[in-house]
Amino acid sequence: MRHDNPCSSAPDPAPLRRLGCAFLLLAVTGCASPGARTPGDPLEPMNRAVYKFNDVADRYVAKPVARTYDTLVPEFIRTGVRNSSTTWTTCSSSPMTCFKAR
């Protein structure tokens, strides 16, 4: 709440604040102008082909194999495989960790 003090000689900051906001708004919209159009991703056709291949491979190969693995392999074997995989990953990254002094 603003109290008008007749003894106060300070100027009202509202006009200056509005001017600053207007300047900021103009500066931001200047950055958002489209400018010269650039061509899209030159590798887009290849990216789309790779995505389509990966989607089909995931749908028809990886998911059925994973579901079959989950269905046929007992839990304790899956845990052993997971632990072994973690160990190999840790062993392969440990020398690099030592070199980085971590």
Image (cartoon, rainbow, N blue to C red):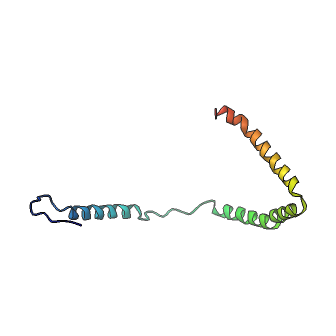
In this view, the residue in front, 69 or 30, is: 69
Image quadrant where residue 19 sits: bottom left
Q: Quadrant of the N terminus?
A: bottom left
Q: Is residue 71 left or right of residue 56?
A: right
Residue 50 pos. (x, y %) = 72, 61
Q: Is residue 47 left or right of residue 85?
A: left
- Residue drawn at point x = 89 percent, y = 58 percent: 74
Q: Quadrant of the C terminus?
A: top right
Q: Is residue 24 left or right of residue 45?
A: left
State whether residue 81 is above or below residue 20: above
In this view, the residue in front, 96 or 47, is: 96
In this view, the residue in front, 55 or 66, is: 66
Number of marks present in the image shown? 0
Residue 10 pos. (x, y %) = 14, 58
Image quadrant where residue 70 sits: bottom right
- Residue drawn at point x = 66 percent, y = 64 percent: 45
Residue 56 pos. (x, y %) = 77, 67
Q: Is residue 33 left or right of residue 94?
A: left
User: Quick one: which residue is furthest to the left in this view?
Assistant: 7
Residue 38 pos. (x, y %) = 51, 62
